Image (cartoon, grey):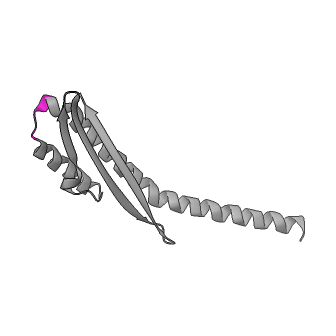
Amino acid sequence: MNPRGASTLRGMILFLLLVLLGFFAYRLVPVYVNAYDFRDSMRTQARFATVDQKPFDTIRAELYNKAQELNLPIERQDIQITKGPDGTTISTTFTVPVDLSFFVKDVQFDFSERGQ
């Protein structure tokens, strides 16, 4: 094989790898963005839970609505809220299945936020 053909093959392989990487990013990045947006909502709710004196059911409903808005597979009962001497803690664990055409990747999230 001449040197020109080898560099063309290498270039094609590199191009295919970049396309594949771009495709995976296209499918995975929105899931992470939505999950961390939800975590930010959890953090805000935990920080102001003591000040606002909201009932836990109201906080749970607001977070559930936020999860639905972000298309996250979270049920109301998955959102745990506890109040302790060091503040209110909100936690949840959920898995988002991401279809990558060749296989389905389950992305697990385990968030816990404490407000004081």
Residue 63 appears at what percent x and percent y? 21, 48
Residue depicted at x 27% and y 34%:
114
Q: Is residue 65 left or right of residue 58?
A: right
Q: In this view, does 20 lie to the left or right of 73?
A: right
Residue 96 appears at what percent x and percent y? 36, 60
Residue depicted at x 58% and y 63%:
20
Q: Which quarter of the image is occupied by the C terminus?
A: top left
By secondary structure, the bulk of the magenta-drawn segment is best described as loop
Nearest to the observer: residue 111 or residue 12: 111
Residue 50 versus residue 72 in the image, above or below? above
Q: Give the range drawn in magenta.
A: 51-55
Residue 34 appears at what percent x and percent y? 35, 51
Q: In this view, does 116 lie to the left or right of 23?
A: left
Queried whether the magenta region covers residue 45, the answer comes back as no
Residue 5 appears at what percent x and percent y? 84, 69
Locate residue 52: give its quadrant: top left
Q: Farthest residue toward the right?
A: 2
Q: Which quarter of the image is occupied by the N terminus?
A: bottom right
Locate residue 51: give its quadrant: top left
Residue depicted at x 83% and y 66%:
6
